[in-house]
């Protein structure tokens, strides 16, 4: 193994925090993390560590279902200039958005796991607001509104939604594109919409 200086270490420290899932990205991305061979880390490296003043961030994954029951409704057109659901609830795409959660949707290799997490986070937020209907747009944004229940289909149905970031939607875990919403509704305790 080739070392880059006289003193090298992997400190073995593990850092976390109550809001780590939304603050880890605060100082930006770095290329100084290394794998066990002291080579630059890549998305496919299973074990990496930060060097100097950097951290390699891991996230805990789970197979648990969302604690907020929801049901897929379908795919609908949504021109950005005339949104039926016009309240941005979460934004995993634009780091300067006030609704940015510190998660960049394009960084995940497990799209379905990421999308289920986004849908669940969105369901939590709209339930807090007293809303029932919400939509996933552009692979990383959640929209809703107080009138979403009656307005989500105002531009008509669409077939421009997708699963796994590229294939046409054929499951209940889907996203809209730039001009479409994949709509979901919260279910009550009896699993009815």
Image: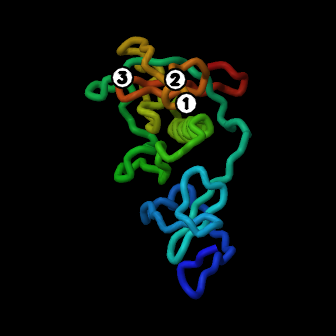
Residue where numbered disc 2 is placed: 167
Q: Is residue 151 left or right of residue 20?
A: left
The kind of secondary structure element at disc 1 is loop
The crowd level at tag 2 (other Cα within 10 Å; few <14, some 14-19, many 20+) is: few
Kind of element beneath mark 2: strand
Looking at the rendered image, the quarter that the C terminus falls into is: top right
Tell me residue 60's x, y (percent).
Answer: 67, 52
The image position of residue 23, as x and y in percent, is 50, 60
Tell me: residue 162, above or below residue 46.
above
In the visual, does 156 lie left or right of 13?
left
Frontmost of labels 3 and 2 is 2
Q: Is residue 65 visible?
A: yes
Between discs 3 and 1, the one toward the N terminus = 3
Residue at 42% across, 15% down: 153
Give residue 179's position: percent from left, percent from top.
35, 25
Q: Is residue 120 left or right of residue 137?
A: right
Mark 1, residue position: 164
Does residue 52 lie above or below 115 as drawn? below
Which residue is painted at 58% across and 40% down in the image?
Answer: 114
Q: Residue at x 44, y 60 (%)?
A: 29
- The quadrant of the rendering that contains the N terminus is bottom right
> Do tag 1 and tag 2 residues touch (Cβ < 8 Å)?
yes
Crowd tier of the residue under label 3, counting other residues whose Cα lies within 10 Å: few below 14, some 14–19, many 20 or above: many
Residue at 37% x, 15% y: name it. Answer: 154
Q: Secondary structure at mark 3?
A: loop
| Quadrant of res 143 | top left
What is the spatial separation of the Cα atoms under label 3 and label 1, in whole angstroms? 20 Å
Residue bearing the label numbered 3: 78
The answer to which of marks 3 and 2 sits earlier in the sequence is: 3
Q: Is residue 87 above or below residue 149?
A: below
């Amino acid at each position: 193994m080739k070392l880059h200086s006289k003193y090298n270490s992997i400190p073995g420290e593990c850092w976390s925090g109550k809001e780590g899932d939304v603050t880890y990205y605060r100082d930006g991305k770095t290329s100084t993390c290394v794998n066990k061979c002291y080579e630059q880390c890549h998305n496919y490296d299973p074990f990496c560590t930060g060097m100097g003043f950097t951290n390699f961030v891991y996230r805990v994954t789970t197979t648990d279902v969302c604690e907020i029951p929801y049901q897929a409704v379908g795919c609908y057109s949504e021109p950005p200039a005339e949104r039926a659901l016009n309240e941005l609830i979460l934004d995993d795409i634009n780091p300067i958005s006030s609704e940015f959660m510190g998660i960049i949707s394009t960084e995940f290799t497990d799209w379905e796991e990421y999308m289920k997490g986004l849908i669940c986070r969105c369901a939590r937020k709209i339930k807090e607001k007293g809303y029932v209907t919400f939509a996933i747009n552009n692979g990383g944004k959640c929209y809703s509104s107080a009138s979403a229940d009656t307005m989500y289909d105002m531009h008509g149905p669409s077939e421009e939604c997708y699963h796994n970031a590229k294939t046409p939607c054929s499951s209940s875990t889907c996203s809209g594109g730039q001009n479409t919403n994949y709509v979901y509704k919260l279910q009550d305790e009896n699993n009815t919409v």
